[in-house]
Image: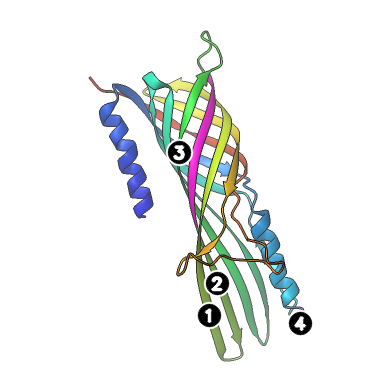
Amino acid sequence: MRILISILLLVSSFGVFSQSGKLVFETNYNTFSQASLSDFQEEFKADLPEIPIQTTDDFPGNIGFTLGYEIVNANVLVFGSYNTTGGKLSYSDFSGVVRITESLKGYTLGAEYLVPFNKTDSNFTLGLRGFGMYSTMSLENFTEILDDVTEENIDFQSINLGVGARVIYEYPLSFLIIKASVGFDLTFGGTLMFQENSDFHLENNAGEKVKTNWTGLRTALGIAIPLNNQ
């Protein structure tokens, strides 16, 4: 919540200092790759051969949200985004329940340079972006065998840096603008560190670092509200 508030304050500050701009709201559908976490989840299944545990969620495509402010004179969009996805293994029978969940959340702050495709058609724009991402992951292990209940929860955090490009289409409608876009983000880093002690990181059975990886397709549908400050 504090991160989202900081994004709102930062975006608002650009509206104060720029002469004209657009307030942007977008809903995103993303297919970000989390292959490292997906493989790590599969190791849980291999480590529990006596339990026929099944994968019920494997870090699927997800819905996200973006709030931004476009500085029209500079062709720059400052934005903040929120995304969430996760994995889940579960098994239940008459004797009890075993459930392992990995809840992953990502907070993004970045800037995008907007390049019109040509001077005669300003509806299509190329966006070139750079950004940083802060991620949190909660790993929860819940076991209930007869009347014996065990719950374990471990929290992790990671930092990704990324670049991306997208094609944006804008359609003016009354006092607002309809926006749609499709693009691709590429991220680096992302080692998952223990929140209680950042000197230690999460490893798989081969001793390799487990990482977040928000690389993938990003689509968006939203609105832009022009703001003119005198």
Give the CA distance from mark 2 to mark 3. 31 Å
User: Which residue is at a point 64% across and 53% down the rendered structure image?
Assistant: 34
Q: Are marks 2 and 1 in contact (CB under 8 Å)?
A: yes
Direction front: furthest residue:
199
Q: Nearer the viewer, mark 2 or mark 3?
A: 3
Number of marks in picture: 4
| Residue 110 circle label | 3
What secondary structure predominates along the stretch shown in magenta? strand
Secondary structure beneath label 3:
strand
Direction top: furthest residue:
120
Secondary structure beneath label 1:
strand
Mark 1 or 3, nearer chain start: 3
Residue 191 at x, y = what percent?
A: 57, 57
Q: Nearer the viewer, residue 68 or 200?
A: 200
Report crowding for label 1: few under 14, some 14 to 19, many 20 or more residues within 10 A (C-alpha): few
Give the CA distance from mark 1 to mark 3. 37 Å
Colour scheme in use: rainbow
Q: Which amino acid type corresponds to the residue marked 3 in the rendered image?
A: Gly
User: Which residue is at a point 72% across and 78% down the rendered structure image?
Assistant: 48
Q: Nearer the viewer, mark 1 or mark 3?
A: 3
Give the residue pinned by disc 1: 151
Report crowding for label 3: few under 14, some 14 to 19, many 20 or more residues within 10 A (C-alpha): some
Q: Which amino acid type corresponds to the residue marked 2 in the rendered image?
A: Glu
Residue 42 at x, y = what percent?
A: 71, 66
Give the residue pinned by disc 2: 140
Tell me where the magenta segment starts and ends, as one range.
124-135
Q: Which amino acid type corresponds to the residue marked 4 in the rendered image?
A: Glu
Give the residue pinned by disc 4: 50
User: Which residue is at a point 55% across and 41% down the rendered structure image?
Assistant: 162
| Residue 113 circle label | none
Residue 187 at x, y = what percent?
A: 58, 44
Give the CA distance from mark 1 to mark 4. 20 Å
